[in-house]
Amino acid sequence: DRLSSEGLARAMDALDERSREVIFARYLNGDGEGNLAPKTLQELATRFGVSIERVRQIEKKAIQKMHEALKGDSDIIEG
């Protein structure tokens, strides 16, 4: 099962800009050749000027928000 592009867009819309950037960098960041190139917590901590633990907290809360935004919408799952 995969999340449809509509579902992903809806989930990402539930996030503030920094949370969106963290999720994109950790899970959706490509290297331009079709390969995933996720950023490390350290890279994001340096980018945002916060601790690694704070980035982890932002990531965790963002995933929870995305889950809540999609709760009950079984039509957004493909497969």
Image (tube, grey):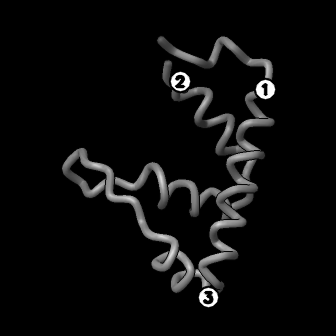
Front one among 28 and 13: 28
Q: Are marks 2 and 1 in contact (CB under 8 Å)?
A: no
Mark 1 residue element: loop
Closer to us: 29 or 57: 57
Q: Residue at x 75, y 56 (%)?
A: 61
Residue at horizontal 71 percent and vertical 53 percent from the top: 62
The kind of residue on which mark 3 rests is: Gly
Q: Is disc 3 placed on a helix, strand or loop?
A: loop
The x, y position of residue 10, in whole percent, is 68, 34
Of labels 3 and 2, earlier in sequence is 2
Q: In this figure, which residue is indicated by the disc labeled 3?
A: 49
Q: Position of residue 24 (x, y in %)?
A: 51, 55
Q: Position of residue 17 (x, y in %)?
A: 68, 62
Q: Between disc 2 and disc 1, whose residue precedes?
A: 2
Mark 3: give few (<14), some (14-19) or many (20+) Cα within 10 Å. Answer: few
Residue at mark 1 to residue at mark 3: CA–CA distance: 32 Å
* Residue that protrudes farthest toward the front in the picture: 53
Amino acid of disc 1: Lys
Q: Is residue 69 above or below residue 37?
A: above
Residue 24 position (above or below residue 45): above
Q: Of 58 and 16, which appears nearest the observer?
A: 58
Amino acid type at circle 2 is: Ser
Report which residue position mark 1 lands on: 71
Q: Residue furthest left?
A: 33
Q: Is residue 57 above or below residue 5?
A: below
Between marks 2 and 1, how big is the CA–CA gap? 14 Å
Residue drawn at 52 percent across, 82 percent down: 47
Label 2: which secondary element: loop
* Residue at 40%, 55% in the rendered image: 29
Q: Residue 4, labelled with which disc?
A: 2
